[in-house]
Amino acid sequence: MSDHRLPNIQKILVIRNDGIGDLLNSTPAIALLRQNYADAEITVLAQPLNAPILVGNPDVDRVLIFDRENEHRRLRDRLRFYQNLRHERYDLAVAMRTASWCNFVAFLSGARYRLGRYQKRFKSLLTHTWQGQYKKGEVHEIDRNFDLVGLICNGQGHRRLVLNLLNNEITATEQLLADWEIAPNDFLVGIHPGGSSFDKRWPEENYATVADTLAHQYGAKILILRGPDEAELERNVQKALQSTSIAYAPKSIRELAALIKHCDFFVCNDSGPMHIAAALDVRTVAIFGPTDHVAWKPLSEEATIVRRDMPCWPCSAHKCKIGWECTKKLTVDTVWNRVEEWSQDKVDPVDHGR
């Protein structure tokens, strides 16, 4: 068997400055890089949104943050960032994200080897390119990333997301739950009605119906989690809820992850928190709309998805002539049936006759 590893690799730059789920689904490929280049320093170039995911990751030595909206908004600040990157003298740059900017950054880093996916107009920026084509509905993002780093690595890698919580993060959220009078033996259900775009969001009133049914039939404590820009979604769910709930906007991605870890069950849209739950092996039902669920489903035996099949799937479109029927017309009964099936061994029904 031929050795795919590159010689004399001391410093590696991995570029993945997009979403939480995108970065989490790159962690197995980063682990494969670590396995093949055990003595190299691995730096990940991320953005403020997803960088906290890497705290405690044993395969990552450093994290660089490119903040396009603030610190690096002006051209001169970006040029200074690129200059500093070049001074690091990386041996290998991996453009894990498929984007022209990432290929440019790999080139600007001055790395001797530059790996990324083939783009005809910018092919000269890279020294190693993955030129395969993927049909929609066939390959998971994790395996796409394995294909990419497989050009310079030996072995198959492990199809497991890497997300490690710190002891103090667990302890802090335990105190939060205690303050909310949620006991360790309560059946805690996390609800996350948000998502990166409108087309991915199942209607809030439907979430309320599912939450009410869980509270009534299983005595569940309901915890509604939201992002900083999702206050209206939270209010809409609470307005439609008949049962008691706690709504909370975590102060950070790390706090969100620690709270999800404490949940016995999690119901959410196709989103970053969905991938966090998968990484932490929390029992999850995820609702998918127009996205390619084969490529982006949560990678965990504890997770399942529910979706409405449509002839136009997958589109990942932010405009839809039929009003995103794949998401908006997915029925409560369909989702509830999956929730009920998936929660069978987690909790016993409440006997309201006593």
Image (cartoon, rainbow, N blue to C red):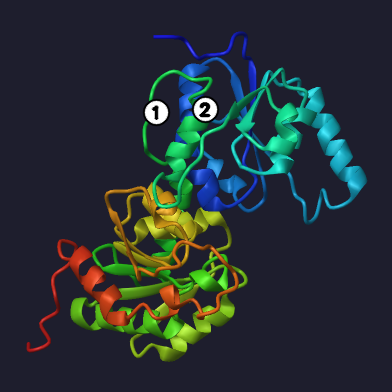
Seen from the viewer's position, the closer of residues 249 and 296 is 296
Lateral position of residue 284 relative to residue 111, left or right? left
In which image quadrant can residue 349 be found? bottom left
Q: In the drawing, what numbered circle is on residue 149?
A: 2
Which residue is depicted at the point 57% across and 58% down?
252
Secondary structure beneath label 2: helix
Q: Which residue is mark 1?
A: 157
Q: Badge 1 local density, few (<14 within 10 Å), some, or many (20+)?
A: some
**Could you give the CA–CA distance between mark 2 and mark 1, rounded to whole angstroms?**
10 Å
Q: What's the residue at 58%, 62% (across, down)?
A: 251
Relative side of 350 to 149, left or right: left
Is residue 2 placed above or below 336 in the rendered structure? above
Q: Is residue 162 visible?
A: no
Q: Callout 1: helix, strand or loop?
A: loop
CB under 8 Å between discs 2 and 1: yes
Amino acid type of the residue tagged 1 in the rendering: Gly
Considering every residue shown, the one lying at the far right of the view is: 76
Quadrant, the N terminus: top left
Give coordinates of residue 307: x percent, y percent. 35, 68
